[in-house]
Image: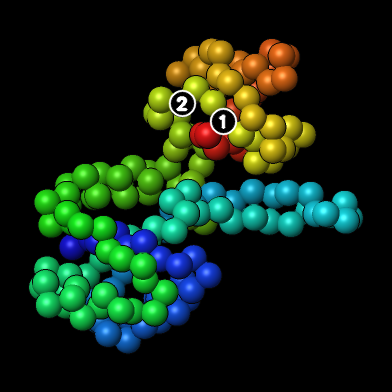
Amino acid sequence: MWIIAKIKFKEICNFKKNLGNFIKNDLEFYEPHITYRQRSIKKTGYKTIKKFILSGYIFCKSESFKNKSTLSSLKFTKGLEYFLPGHLYNQNEINKFINYCKDHEDPLGNLKQSFFSNLNITKGIFVSGPFTNLIFEIINNNNFKKNIQVLCKNKKITINLNGGGIFLPV
C-alpha cells in the first residue's frame, strides 16, 4: 500500500533512515525526478542537477501502512511534516501515477521529457540549454511529437524535443 508523505526536503535522508528502522522488511520509496546539466557559476564547466518534480513529497510503500496504529506511531518521524490523508481510497490513482512515471523513465531512473507530453500545459521554463531560466508560452505543441513552437520574449522559437533541452511546466 502506497502513502504520500510531505517531508522536510533537507531531512530526506533522516526520514528514510528512521522510517526504515521502524518498518524493517517491505519498505519501498519512489521519488520521480529529472536530471539535467547546467553551466556552473564560474563558467568553467557543467554540473549535474537532480530535480524532484514533486518537491517535498515522496511515495512510500509498505503493507504495514494498512494498519492505522502504524501510521499514528509514525507521525513524529524526523523529517516528516505529515502524511497526505485519503491514501486508502486513492490507491488506484497513486498506482496509475507511479506507473505513468516509470513508463517515462530512462534506464537510470530519470524522467524523460515525454513525461510532460500528456500534460495540458500552456507555459513552461527552460532548465537546460541556451534558453535556461527563460519562461515561454506554448503556441503549437503538435501533440509533443517531434517539436513545439513557443513564444519567448516576443520571439517565435521552434524546439526539437529530441535535442536534449529540458523544460518544466510553470
Residue in view at x 87 percent, y 51 percent: 43
Residue that carries the numbered disc 1 in the rendered image: 124
Q: Is residue 161 visible?
A: yes
Residue 48 placement (x, y as % from top left)? 68, 56
Q: Residue visible at 24% across and 61% down?
A: 3
Q: Disc 1 on helix, strand or loop?
A: strand
**Quarter residue 130 falls in:** top right
- Mark 1: few, some, or many residues within 10 Å (few <14, many ≥20)? some
Q: Amino acid at mark 2?
A: Ile
Quadrant in the picture for residue 139: top right
Q: Quadrant of residue 81?
A: bottom left
Are the residues tagged 2 and 1 within 8 Å (C-beta)? yes
- The spot of residue 27 in percent (x, y) is 28, 74
Label 2 Cα crowd, 10 Å radius (few <14 / some 14-19 / many 20+) = some
- Residue ID at (53%, 70%): 10
Closer to us: 95 or 139 = 139
